[in-house]
Image (cartoon, rainbow, N blue to C red):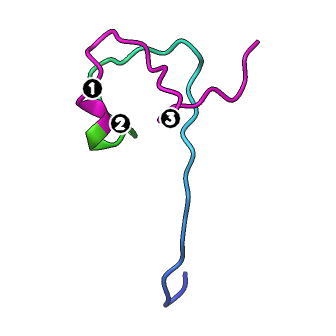
Amino acid sequence: MTSGHRRAMTCAYMPDGNIYNGQPNVLPDAYVKTPAVGDPLNNELQNPLIYRK
């Protein structure tokens, strides 16, 4: 614990091929307006693929 402000960053990882289930979870409000339930989460700007088998 500190008395001052600290910067923080989080990363949320999900498997390649995930689809949108209608629950925003960690996705920003502006982004969750674009996919429909069942759409793949394959937007490279929002969800870049960092590893492919």
Residue at point 49% right, 15% down?
18
Q: Are marks 3 and 2 in contact (CB under 8 Å)?
A: no
State left or right for residue 37 relative to residue 25: left
Is disc 1 surrounded by few (<14), some (14 to 19) or many (20+) residues within 10 Å? few
Residue identified by numbered label 1: 34
Amino acid type, label 3: Leu
Which region is colored magenta? 31-53
Query: Whole-percent x and y of residue 41?
Result: 44, 20
> Picture quarter containing residue 48?
top right
Residue identified by numbered label 2: 25
Amino acid type, label 2: Asn
Residue at point 35% right, 36% down?
25
From this view, report whether residue 26 is shown above or below residue 51. Answer: below
Amino acid type, label 1: Thr
Q: Residue furthest bottom?
A: 3
From this view, report whether residue 45 is shown above or below residue 4. Answer: above
Query: Whole-percent x and y of residue 40?
Result: 43, 13
- Residue nearest the observer in this picture, 28 or 5: 28
- C-alpha separation, residue under disc 2 versus residue under disc 1: 15 Å
